[in-house]
Image (cartoon, helix red, strand yellow):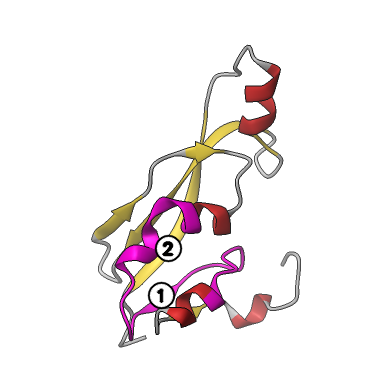
Amino acid sequence: FSDLTEIIDCYETQVQKPHSLKDQVALYSSYKGRDTVKGLAAATGHGVLTFMSPLFCGRKSDKHIVLQSGYLDHIQRGDLVLADRGFLIEEEMAIRGAKLVTPAFMKNQKQF
């Protein structure tokens, strides 16, 4: 990808179980099976970090984090962004004149 702008991915970090049941529900990640916070990171193809989001409750989807983090505000026309299959943001990228590329071998599959 000679025209690659960034690679994005969300990461999760385990946190201590909160006392509040409401907070427990918000922080529980079914993917990790524990209470987490989740953030979005973007890096160039050379590994330079270009964006770090605030942290969100672990229950939030990758798409929600992209939309709420402000990441899309720095996307420019012609950008090419690589991501995994959890980033269902093709339309939002296209509106900005950018392109999202996800692994073709994962299209329409739930897992490897």
Numbered disc total: 2
Q: Which residues are magenta?
A: 66-91
Q: Residue at coordinates 38% horizontally, 59% vertically from top-left?
A: 71
Q: Which element is circle 1 on?
A: strand
Please give the residue where the numbered disc 2 appears in the rendered image: 8
Label at residue 81: 1
Percent position (x, y) of residue 56?
50, 39
Q: Earlier in the sequence, mark 1 or mark 2?
A: 2
Name the image quarter holding the N terminus.
Answer: bottom left
- In the image, taking residue 94 as reference, residue 74 lies left or right, namely left
Q: Amino acid at mark 1?
A: Val
Residue 55, located in which quarter of the rendered image? top left
Residue 49, located in which quarter of the rendered image? bottom left
Label at residue 112: none
Q: Residue at coordinates 45% horizontally, 73% vertically from top-left?
A: 82
* Residue 88 included in the magenta stretch of the image: yes
* Residue 10 included in the magenta stretch of the image: no
